[in-house]
Amino acid sequence: MEKDEIGRVTILCRKLIIADRDDRGLQWLIGSPFFPPLTVVSTLRCIHFLPNSSSPDIVKESEEIGTLLPKGFNVIGAVVHASSDIERSSRGAIDAALRLSDALLGEGSGRDAETRDIIGAVAEKNGGDTSFFVSRGKKLDSLEMITSVFYEKEPEKYIWERGCLLRCELPFQVPFYYSSKDLHEGNFLCASDEIIAKLKDPQAAYIIETSNCISSEVAQSVIIRGVELNNHTDGTHAKNLNLVAPTSDPQFITCGKFFLERKTSSIVYSAEDADVLQVSVMINRSTKSLSSFAPVAEYFPAPEDVKLQVVHLKLEVLCYSARNYPLVHAISELIIPGLNHQFNALKKAVLPSLIDHQPQFRPYHFSPPGVLHPVTAIYELSYGETELKLVEARKALHQRLGLPLDRPLLRIANALNLSLSNPKGSNTFSRKVLCQVLRCSRMCILGFQAVESQGDLPLWFRVLTYIITIFRMVLMTRAGAVLIVHCKQLFHGSDFSTTQPLMFHHIEKYNKFL
């Protein structure tokens, strides 16, 4: 790490301050342990506050942000809006960010608290300059003002040239018995905790593979066993990337060894086109036992009639890792904590409706415009995507990410497809193809409306127009009335691709698109 990076704030996101009319405006600064300490990747708006207070609700914020952010990104500071007493305001921002960071890291977060750098930024309410202060460790009484601020010109390249994504999908079933008269939540919690505890079992095996390796010189898959994992879950090793073990040791194969040397002239840097490692979790039951034993079955008579309930859950986590990060540490400090956090979120969401109906919670990953890293949202699809609670949940995500409310950017149709069967770059390619198809269909329909008044049209043209119209309506139904176009918009000095909604004349309120 260069010396000037320690005392300099590096801004990667193109929009640091999200417009907020709320006087309690508070934003979280997101960084990564794989980057220099004062590197801001993105910013998230705080949307939960304590009643009748300007203090954030750390419990609710940590629950939502822990699910939203991929492991490998964390909270490194906060931004507040103030017009006077800047240093005091920055101290309050640092205190809030430190409490949220501790809540996200959970147990063991105190190990590196003394070396953690937390940013406290103060933005003037009238749109003036932004002042940056840094607290080294937990020393809130002595703040260091940072005057050197660097805005990265190629943030996508900065992120995806250094790192890659790890994706782990884990579907499983939770069978449990409960009384026919009353549901004991403890039975479900106990059964589910036993399943998730097997992630660190010595018999667990993690298979890491990728789909874009075409050279025989590059390892196609690696198996890491539970006995090889470490006990750290807070990203301790991520801060010492220069101290990794030699790659000749199979136990310390790095993430970058899976990927070929790429031609920088033709590569596209984005979350949709990032290199992805697929992680599969297995349980190895074929190991030889050290001692001989006989199978034993215990009988526990039920005092009353019981019923069997089987809950189907599916975990799917994304993690960001540096290319020179060992896979053993990536599994221990990124994948397992990510699965644990998402499982706890699903478990809390499933409990209220455990008996009434079988809930259908499913995590989806998105790469919305203006956000440099992917985000994860958990949707409940029992009543469809247009159910009111789900609409409100998407609206809250738009507000947190600073996205416009008139574009359905977080619908399922816009979710990333990072499976092994999906070739690299097909997300971008499919969007471009759909763009051309819908654009042509719209032009044909508009042309039909323009020439319809001039006389009768040939039969073949009418049939073709009707087919295009039907095809267009089918796409709109599946994609939630979204017309994906590849447009260019001026966004803080650079162009970017985005999705636009198809506006109907009879719909005036844009909130219906969410």
Image (cartoon, helix red, strand yellow):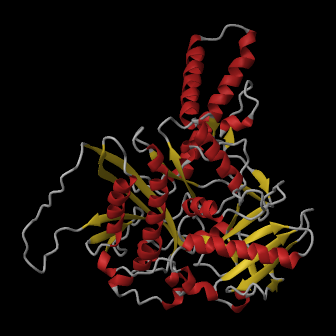
Residue 446: x and y in percent read 71, 24
Q: Is residue 75 visible?
A: no
Q: Which quadrant: the C terminus?
A: top right
Horizontally, residue 494 falls left or right of residue 512, namely: right
Q: Quadrant of the N terminus?
A: bottom right
Residue in front for this viewpoint, 436 or 473:
473
Coordinates of residue 481 in the picture (x, y in percent)? 62, 33
Which residue sits furthest front? 303
In this view of the protein, which residue sits in the foreground, 369 or 131?
131
Give the residue drawn at x 42%, y 89%. 245
Q: Residue furthest top?
A: 456
On the image, which quarter does residue 297 sit in?
bottom left
Q: Is residue 355 left or right of residue 180?
A: right
Q: Is residue 452 above or below residue 508?
A: above
| Residue occupying image coordinates x 41% and y 90% | 246
> How many labels were placed on the picture?
0
Residue at point 47%, 46% (across, down)? 352
- Viewer-proximal residue, 257 or 80? 80
Q: Is residue 16 visible?
A: yes
Q: Is residue 338 above or below residue 183?
A: below
- Horizontally, is 154 left or right of 113 in the view? right
Query: Residue at 45% of width from left, 71% of height from top?
Result: 259
Residue 158 coordinates in the image, percent (x, y)? 64, 72
Q: Quadrant of residue 355?
A: top left
